[in-house]
Amino acid sequence: MDVNAVNKARVVYYGLLSSLFSFCLGRDQFDNILKSIDVLRKNPIDEQTGSALNRMQEKLTAGGWQALKDESDAVFYNPTAAFVPMTASFYAEQRDDGAKRREMIGYVLESKFRRNADEFKEQEDHVEFVLFFMQQLILEELRGDASCRILAGKVFANILNEMLDEFADGLVRHAESRVYTDAALVLQSFTECERLFLDIAGPVRKKQDACRPSDRAEILSGGRA
């Protein structure tokens, strides 16, 4: 296995997902999303990812930044719609600002990075911040810092691994999710690849928490543009 090549692809996936789940989705994130999709769709992880990336490119090209921002607001921040939690603490404790945030702060302090409060308004265990932090650790590993691989493994195992399945399911189920349904499919495939690459088992999940393949197929065939 060419670990450097894998890491370069991981950097792009983490950058794409971090931008998609941005707390304040700006035009700079939108530009990064389009560029990342164009790169990744040419050599996707699997068929599900390739199809999802192609659909995302079509929808984003047609709708532009404003359409994605409106969808992001509807999916994540509309108080009258279904709630999709975005922090690791919520998935662990059903509340924000919990133990997972403190744990994530500890991982940040182990690194040379610090949260820029002017750029990141969200908490340290917010999915956008964690994904961006993972991207930076992998970049540092590519520059020769082997300790970052160990730290990234801990962050994935103890923060992301416990939340990403439920987070993706929430996106697939959400009534306002169109681009984010496809983003969830990309996230699902990437999560499984990360588990294989880092040799980390997925969490044990209750049957009622899992989104069955038939559910997903029904949602995707339900007339979403």
Image (tube, rainbow, N blue to C red):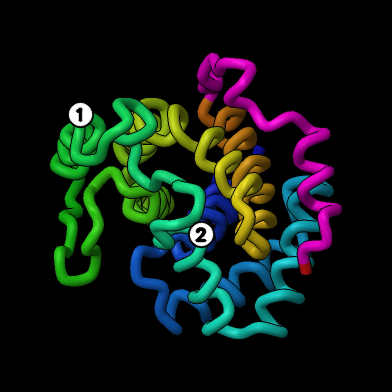
Question: Magenta segment range?
Answer: 199-224
The residue where tag 1 is placed is 99
> Can residue 40 be seen by looking at this rendering?
yes
- Location of the N terminus by quadrant is top right
* Crowding near the residue tagged with mark 1, few <14, some 14–19, many ≥20 C-alpha atoms within 10 Å: some
> Can residue 11 be seen by looking at this rendering?
no
Q: Amino acid at mark 1?
A: Ala
Q: Under tag 1, what secondary structure? A: helix
Work out whether 168 lies above or below 24. Answer: above
Say if the magenta span includes residue 201. yes
- Measured from the top left, where is residue 112 in percent x and y? 17, 50
Sequence-wise first label, 2 or 1: 2
Q: Is residue 50 left or right of residue 40?
A: right
Residue most extreme to the front:
80
- Measured from the top left, where is residue 181 in percent x and y? 66, 54
- Measured from the top left, where is residue 12 in percent x and y? 54, 60
The residue where tag 2 is placed is 75
